[in-house]
Amino acid sequence: MLTDTIKQLVGDKPVNVGRQHEIDLARAVPVFFLPFVHTVIECTPLDRLYDPIPFFFNIVIGQPFGAPMFLFAMGACILYSHSHSAQKLMLRGITLFIAGFLLNALRFGIPYLIGYGLTGNSEKFITPLPYRVFGNDVLQFAGLFFLLFGFLQYRKISDKVIVILALTMSVTGSFIRHKDLGNPVLNIMLGHLMGTEDKAQLVMTDFPLLNWFIVPVMGYVFGKLLMRIKDKAKFYRIVAPVPLLTAVVFFVLEYIFGFGQMDSGPTLLYSENCYYHLLWYDALMLAAFAIGILGVYYALNKISPMFLKKFFTSLSRNITHVYVIHWLFVVMTTNVVLYSVRGTQDLPVGPTLLLSAAIFLVTYPLALLWERVAAGKKEK
């Protein structure tokens, strides 16, 4: 019955080919909260990370509303881009992969060397530097995703086979995570593909390809369906509630019983690993949550005033600019300035939130300036 109803909403040709404002909102919300999430993590002592406000930003916003939502939306946007040929996807992947290391050099390499010069603390600033500069994060993952996905498109692999491959990768990644290979070089190199960690340095890989590939793939499948939906309001009313409720209940149970991505474990490293090296069922629940939240965002967009729509569209459009710029301010203010002056970067909740807001208020105008300068160069 439900399947038949959905089939009736699907057109033979693409219908929704312009900007999808609920996807803009799905990208804009994590971008808006980026300075808050990362500053809270940097300025909150380990024993206070599960206090209400740090928990809200680190776990609630930083997990289902954060990177998973962005990566799902990234997959959903592939066909909405003018550059979705296999060759252009692979080129985009190479560009993002290289950009990830350039960002690492700017946000970690240079600040950490400055921090070492000011404090002489090699354990904090020099020892973890190879992981910070050459390790992986969301940009490197996005690059590898587009490379692999573009290659699969080039080989004309069907969507069904790609989904099966993604699920197989997710299950495989679930069984070979949290591995310390005993060598920093191996940990870094293979950490782009599987979940590795260095137990001695308390460093782990963030978004290994095996574990996370399925999230943007599910986004791509959803986006491909969304393009052909004739009545989006009815579609979301039918499709969104059950996945959203199921995912929320599942996440609450994970937290209560301490398993999956909500497993707190004995150390922060263990806890973060459970998220960054997520299990296959976590990935599926995050994708279900994303579908449900898109329905909520669609409804919110219908009642939002125009200035908010423009603001969130701007944030979505400048997602990469905001991501890069905010990281520079977060690391410099917390790891370099605060640590060098005070001997610690820990702050109470109030000052932490004020610092987060200040970083956003500086970051967003700079992102807009970057956008204008880039647009001017293209016109020339």
Image (spheres, grey):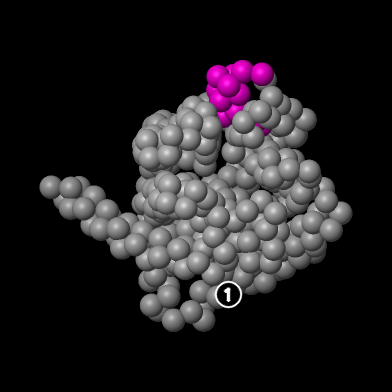
* Extent of the magenta region: 182-197
Asked whether 232 or 106 is in front, the reply is 106
Question: Looking at numbered disc 1 in the image, what kind of residue is underneath it?
Answer: Ala
Look at the image and say whether residue 185 sits in the magenta stretch: yes
Which picture quadrant has residue 157? top right
Q: Residue at x 70, y 59 (%)?
A: 50
Asked whether 142 or 119 is in front, the reply is 119
Q: Residue at x 82, y 48 (%)?
A: 259
| 348 versus 86 height, above or below | below
Q: Residue at x 43, y 34 (%)?
A: 120
Which picture quadrant has residue 257? bottom right
Can you give x and y, in whole percent of width and height, for residue 315 in the image? 41, 62
Can you give x and y, in whole percent of width and height, for residue 225 in the image? 59, 54
Few, some or many residues within 10 Å of mark 1 (<14, 14–19, 20+): some
Q: Residue at x 58, y 75 (%)?
A: 299
Which picture quadrant has residue 186? top right
Q: Answer left or right for 29 relative to 312.
A: right
Asked whether 276 or 23 is in front, the reply is 276
| 158 versus 345 height, above or below | above
Q: Quadrant of the N terminus?
A: bottom right
| 88 versus 229 height, above or below | above
Secondary element under disc 1, as helix, strand or loop, is helix
